[in-house]
Amino acid sequence: MRIAIACSGLDGSPPDLDAWATDLGRALAARREKVVLFKPSGVELEPHECTLPGRGSAFAPARELLRRIPRLLGRDRAGEGDDRSAEHDRFARALITPLREGRFDVLHVREPRVALQVQKARRFGRLKTRTVLLHGPEGSSGDLQAFAYVHHLAPAPPEGASALEAWRPTWTAIPRFVDTAAFRPGRADALRLDLGIPTSAVVVLACSPIRRHRDRVSRVIDECALLLARDPGSPVHLILAGPRDPETPRPPR
């Protein structure tokens, strides 16, 4: 099986999902799978990476012109003249040719617009690649019915039971990668000593991006705070492990 991973890396993309695509490509390559990670620009750091032609900085003037056109025509940037949507479309068109020529069986991509373009090309017989859409926990499940294959990063959609009713057998939930060599059950007395945590204490470890507008981490913090409020002597320590959004204040120690 030939596997393609695509990540446009456009402005506004969650950096943790960009890193997830990189980690997925590296993990599959380490298992000797036939995988290629397609990127819009930059240096090909590993043998399985591929930069799409015509996506680099040499095209910046053209992209700037396209960015200005909607305002010159008086169009709403959120509508037809959305430059980010146009960038997604160009990325998808650049991606279709290598997918077809490389006879890839599966494309794993997180941008819905790119996934739709590749699905459309398959529907018209331009290629045989099946598309798997990566759906992050902060995304909406409202528009997912257009995709036959969806990879959820959370066990359940954030909308709850109403979204679960639309769940398809071809959709699956696989959480974010956890390095089991670094995170595994066992003793870590030296690390506890460095962090000032007693060896007899209970440690709650939450691995997740830390963002102001993300309720999952906030809920873990609130639950631990409630526990300590009820029992101030409770030997519970909470550790948050993950990248922090620049707009999100550092959680109190």
Image (cartoon, helix red, strand yellow):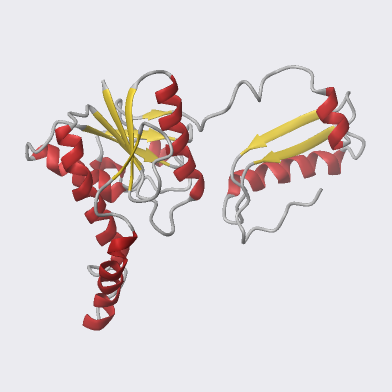
Relative horizontal placement of residue 251, taking residue 123 as reference (left or right): right
What residue appears at the point 44 percent right and 58 percent down from the top-left corner?
Answer: 12
Residue 132 shows in this picture:
yes
Q: Residue furthest right?
A: 233
In the image, 125 versus 22, the foreground residue is 22
What residue appears at the point 28 percent right and 75 percent down from the top-left corner?
Answer: 76
Image coords of residue 253 (percent x, y): 82, 48
What residue appears at the point 63 percent right and 42 percent down from the top-left corner?
Answer: 242
In the image, 204 versus 184, the foreground residue is 184
> Can you tell which quarter of the image residue 188 is in?
top right
- Number of labelled discs? 0
Relative horizontal placement of residue 211, taking residue 175 as reference (left or right): right
In the image, 251 versus 96, the foreground residue is 96
Relative horizontal placement of residue 29, taking residue 65 as reference (left or right): right
Residue 156 shows in this picture:
no
Image coords of residue 47 (percent x, y): 37, 31
Image coords of residue 98 (percent x, y): 20, 38
> Can you tell which quarter of the image residue 5 is in?
top left
Quadrant containing the N terminus is top left
What residue appears at the point 81 percent right and 29 percent down from the top-left corner?
Answer: 191
Image coords of residue 73 (percent x, y): 21, 81
> Can you tell which quarter of the image residue 146 is in?
top left
